[in-house]
Each structure stands twice: as C-alpha cells, then as structure tokens.
Amino acid sequence: MTLGSVEAILFVASKPLSYKQLAKSLSITAEKVAEFVETLVAKYNHDDSGIHIIVSDESVQMGTNPAFIEATDGFVKSDIMGELTRAQLETLTVIAYRGPVTRPEVEQIRGVNCAVIIRNLLMRGLIKSSKQQDALMESFVLTIEALAHLGVSKVEELPDYETLSDHEYLNNALDQ
C-alpha cells in the first residue's frame, strides 16, 4: 500500500481512525501507518494549507486548518440555514430509501462527492451516523426528527419504499 491509500481513506472517513484500523484495512503494520501519517503531516500542516492532519493518541483525522475558522464557519453557517438544495434532497432520499448506507455507497449511487452534503445533513439533524464493530466506515440513516417531519414513524412507511429501496438502478450502481 502507498501513502496515497492512507490519504484517500482519511479523506473519505469523516472521523478519527486509529492506526490499527488503518493498518488492518490496508494490510500493513501500524508502524508503516505512523510513517505515512508523519509524511502527510509534513505535506499538509502548513500555515497556508487549508487542510491539516490531526493526530491524537494513535488516531488520525484529516480536517481543516484552524487558521481558516472564519471562512469555514461562514460557509457552514450559510450551508445549514435555509432550504435544502436539490443535491441535499437527493442525498437524503438515497439515505432514506437505502440506509443504513456509507458515504462511499451514497457517492457511488449519486456519482459525486457527498462529504459536505452529508456533513450538512448531520448538522441539520436530518441523518445520524452509526458505526458497526470493526467497520472502517460509518453508515447513515434518517433521524427520528426527519421521519417525524416526513410524517412517518419508520422508513418503510415512505412512499413506494419496497420498490425504491430495492430498485434495480441502485443495486447496479452499488455492484459496480
């Protein structure tokens, strides 16, 4: 495995990962992961970089440079206020009808990066994340509040749930 593999996993994971988790997923040693992390820290953790590698107690996460808090806060604030965008509605629909679903699965179905959209839906309280034991990726489902807002008590009550949750297009997209 390469440095790029660790970098890619940190990019798609929206939470801290232990060196052991990364090592297991990439079939390398935790020591090799630590070497890759050191290289990534040297690559990203500069004053003018928008991205930083955050390391704490044998865990690592890719995040934003705290120096740009005003820019990110302004973006996030405008992003969580107001109406949902078409992309947010599409992502919410995929999670509603296909959940629990991981971010890469949502991206495979939609064909675009959904990191910011998923973060926004989490911040709005419309979806929640859960992580299965030993799973590298967290999965997402609708929250009780989102279900209540839609006027249902469980996702199976959504219109055409049985047909759409097992739709051929979704199955084909995930099989690729």
Image (cartoon, rainbow, N blue to C red):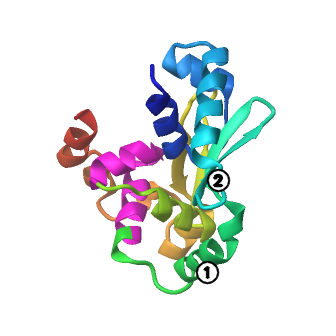
**Do the residues bearing badges 1 and 2 touch, measured as CB atoms within 8 Å?**
no
Q: Residues within 10 Å of mark 1 (few under 14, many from 20)?
A: few
Helix, strand, or loop for circle 1? helix
- Write the residue at 46% across / 64% down: 117
- Residue 5: x and y in percent read 45, 30
Residue at mark 2: 46
Residue at mark 1: 74
* Amino acid under disc 2: His
- Write the residue at 34% across / 75% down: 86
Please check the rendered image and state whether residue 91 is part of the magenta-colored stretch, yes or no: yes
> In which quadrant of the rendered view does residue 56 lie?
top right
Main SS of the magenta part reads helix
The quarter of the rendered structure image containing the N terminus is top left
- Residue 6 — which label? none
Which portion, as a residue range, is magenta?
88-111
Residue closest to the far bottom = 82
Distance from the alpha carbon under mark 1 to that under mark 2: 22 Å
Q: Is residue 134 visible?
A: no
Residue 170 located left or right of residue 147: left
> In which quadrant of the rendered view does residue 134 lie?
top right
**139 or 120: nearer the eye?**
120
* Amino acid under disc 1: Gly
The quarter of the rendered structure image containing the C terminus is top left
- Residue 76: x and y in percent read 59, 74
